[in-house]
Image (spheres, coloured by chain):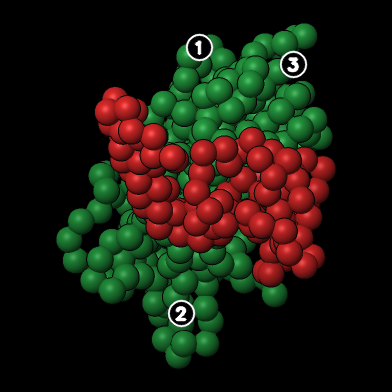
Chain colours: A red, B green
Amino acid sequence: MMIYLDRVFRCYTEPGNDRTGIETDIFNGKCKTFIEGYRYVPHGQTWTREDGVVFAGEMVAPWKDYSALAAAQAGYEEAAAELQDMQEALNLLGVDANG
Amino acid sequence: MVFNMTGNGGGLNVKVVAYSVTPTGVAAENTIGVVTDTAITGWVMQAEQPTSPAAGMVWIKVDFSSTSAFYVDKKNMIKVYPVFAYQYIGGTWVIKDSYIYQNAAWVILFNGYIYYYGNEFESLTGGWIARGPGAIVGTNIIKDTDGITLKSSASTNMQTANKIDLSGFNTLSVVVTDSTANWCYVGVTQNDEDYFNSGNTSANWPTTTPYVEITSPKASFTATLDVSGCSGLWTVVIAIRSDKTSQKTMTVRSVKMDT
């Protein structure tokens, strides 16, 4: 999937000003809220944090609280599972939900 | 400024006392309890290693930061930042588990290190142990008095036995020397199964479980991981990976959490 990195390597799911697009499978299956709470520093690049500490890529780390991101992802997966169940039930009944 | 205090703390707001086990009970404020079976013959508090120690001497190392900083004089003019206690035993400096009594409680003398040149800080980490298939302490995880060497022709992982509370810390730094590794990994995880494997890294370490991968590291390097989003309890994992052409090694010298 394509994600977009800002100048400090925070991840976005949509393009925008000063964002660089990068194709990666790191966030496959993750919801928007989860992805946009992460920072991804690719190989060969470095990020200098505000306090001066330098981090070299490849680094994948949350910049928002991980427990909140994990909760959002869990909610997303639960909703996706429910949607899948509903779709299978409709298929079983021969109902075309898109029709 | 070279700052050197010696003796028994007379007139100073500090004592250094030997304990055979982790200290408990009430003590004078800023009493430093050193867990040792060797009698303390005297002590110094300074940044650099003493040059002419007597057997049994304790050296309280001070640094630029400490979670147990205090004013050593009664007029609150001289602030010290104790970080470790060493004792001169058998002709060598031996790091000792140590605690300080502050605010009616004993706290570990700690400035963020969870490994430092042979000290595994077991009371906090539970020790550093093997993780993942094939990792064995004594075989490909070699513990010496000044480092832990990881060896592998594929990958070898080690971890803290205990989960570490990273709340309030922003950086995890691992100092490595004598490395011939093709890759070095430092990660934190809340699972027991994740490990860095020898092929497709993501196969056994979920891609969004926080980590840093250092490719073709120099012989000596520091791997840093941003843990500012990692509040709560996490297992710290360090791994070496070879390109499988030969056995590679690296020696971990220190692991530190910084605010």
Residue at position x 55%, y 23% from top? B203
The kind of residue tagged 1 is Gly
Residue farthest left in this picture = B25
Density class for disc 2 (Cα within 10 Å; few <14, some 14-19, many ≥20) is some
- Judged by depth in the image, the label closer to the viewer, 1 or 2, is 1
Q: SS of the residue at dot 2?
A: strand
Mark 1 or mark 2: which comes first in sequence? 2
Residue farthest bottom in this picture = B75
The kind of residue tagged 2 is Tyr
Q: CA distance from mark 1 to mark 2?
A: 49 Å
- Disc 2: which residue: B71
State whether residue A15 is above or below residue B189: below
Q: Which mark is residue B243?
A: 3
- Disc 1: which residue: B134
Look at the image and tell me whether residue B191 can be seen: yes
For the residues beneath circles 2 and 3, the answer to whether they share a chain is yes
Residue at position x 53%, y 53% from top? A32
State whether residue B46 is above or below residue B95: below
The kind of residue tagged 3 is Asp
Q: CA distance from mark 3 to mark 1?
A: 16 Å
